[in-house]
Amino acid sequence: MRFAPYRVGARPWRVGPQSSGVRRGTGLSPLTLVGGFILLILAGALLLSLPRCTAAGQTTGVLDALFTSTSAVCVTGLVVVDTGTHWSSLGQVIVLVLIQIGGFGFMTSATLLLLLFGRRIGLRERLLVGETIGISAPGGLVRLIRNMALLTLALEGIGALVLFSRFAVTEGAGRGLWMAVFQSVSAFNNAGFDVFGDFVSLTELRTDAVVVLTTGLLLVAGGLSYVVLADIYRQRRFVRLSLDTKLVLVASRVLVALAVLVYLCAEWGNPGTLGPLALPEKLLCVVFQAVTPRTAGFTTVNIGAMHDYTLLFTMFLMFIGGAAGSTAGGIKVNTFGVLVAAVASTLKGRPQAGAFGRELNVQQVYRALAVVVLALSFIGVSVLFLSLTEDAGVLDVAFEAVSAFGTVGLSTGITPGLSELGRLIIIVTMFVGRLGPLYVALALVQRQRAQEYRYPVESVRIG
């Protein structure tokens, strides 16, 4: 049999079956997730605008309420008004509820609510919720969500009890209990909100090892995701873990170790951060600061007093974020791990990307690259607009934009002074940062189909 040579302009080769004519797009759209978050944010802003939610002597504008609601639902922690002094007890409760729902995920929270009312969950809902938490198979999803809720409440409860033992001594039983619950929920959901007052975060408690370490452990647990924690519990040995879990654990360890080294070297003698502290206090602060940029928002030092190169490194950590399906933001450490594995495989001359004796799906490499490129592009646009609207240095607005996109909540101190346009830009950045990478991943998964054509291969010059 003879084959005709391929001609320029000819139709591509068919390698798959012909289209069956089934209509596409009949599944549950990722827009459901986006719409749900928007409605939740608007409802939270409406509630926070009520006079009863504001402390005596304070007033809340619509934009401030919208900013706070967005930051809470997106578990970011950037605030334009102080959470501990501006909001009344009712306002703080609303903020806490928004943090819990936002950290758990809208679709997951909605599914759990339906289960509590005895409603059945359809296949399309199972698939979408599964994608949001990193599970591709719908089987056992209801049990998984129940276990996630139980684990979340259990860890938050344990954290609150430990913190209560400290806060009750200095603040009394009633106030101490509320501070402990709020801090525990905010920490596990990587939200960064606190009720200590005066925008101090943990800077006045940085010598309290119990508070700092408890908060740090909650941050790590919330940032790893239930899927990773469950895999660790079931397998017990590193060699038996899934490739996803291995990438998350190894990349997280490397980033934390690198952060400890950088912060120690860069800020050791800085009089505005670690300089005045004794050695044990320095080590405690450094370990906590190595964890919090991915992506918590709590801080034990004055971020605005850090050196410029330390801020740049912190932006790198904020951009990466935590694990996929967790309460953390950023492009996700899974995405970072996939790209590092692809680069390492390329440098070793391997034709396929792989890690830990497993080959990575090339489609996942493409998705990871798409997420990173789109994230960098959006952050660049945000920094450009903030530079035009705000009277602040480029590094400060860039730090603010990356913090908002990574849903971190760390700031050099410019957040309360943002203009109205600047606040709107940060609101959009927080929303896109929380849902953007997830939406892109979901959209790419739904658009994926059996390839009907393959084009001829042609080389392009690189470098």
Image (tube, grey):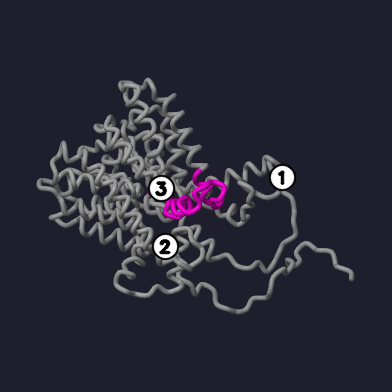
Residue at 48% in and 61% down = 135
In this rendering, the label closer to the viewer, 2 or 3: 2
- Residue 362, can we see it? yes
User: Percent position (x, y) of residue 122?
Assistant: 42, 74
Q: Residues within 10 Å of mark 1 (few under 14, many from 20)?
A: few
- Is 7 placed above or below 284 here? below
Q: Residues within 10 Å of mark 3 (few under 14, many from 20)?
A: many
Q: CA distance from mark 1 to mark 3?
A: 40 Å
- Is 114 placed above or below 415 here? below
Q: What amino acid does circle 2 point to?
A: Leu
- The kind of secondary structure element at disc 2 is helix
In this rendering, the label closer to the viewer, 2 or 1: 2
Residue at 59% in and 54% down = 366
Q: Which residue is mark 3?
A: 223
Residue at 24% in and 50% down = 64
Q: Which residue is mark 1?
A: 461
The reply, left or right, for residue 425 in relation to residue 19 is left
Instruction: Read off the magenta span.
Output: 221-249
Badge number at residue 144: 2
Q: Looking at the image, which is closer to me, 165 or 437?
A: 165
Report the magenta stretch's main SS: helix
Which residue is farthest left? Answer: 56
- Is 19 placed above or below 248 here? below
In this rendering, the label closer to the viewer, 1 or 3: 3
Question: Is 444 one of the magenta-colored residues?
Answer: no
Q: What amino acid does circle 3 point to?
A: Gly
Ranked by sequence position, the earlier of labels 2 and 1 is: 2
Q: What amino acid does circle 1 point to?
A: Arg
User: Percent position (x, y) of residue 83?
Assistant: 22, 45
Ranked by sequence position, the earlier of labels 1 and 3 is: 3
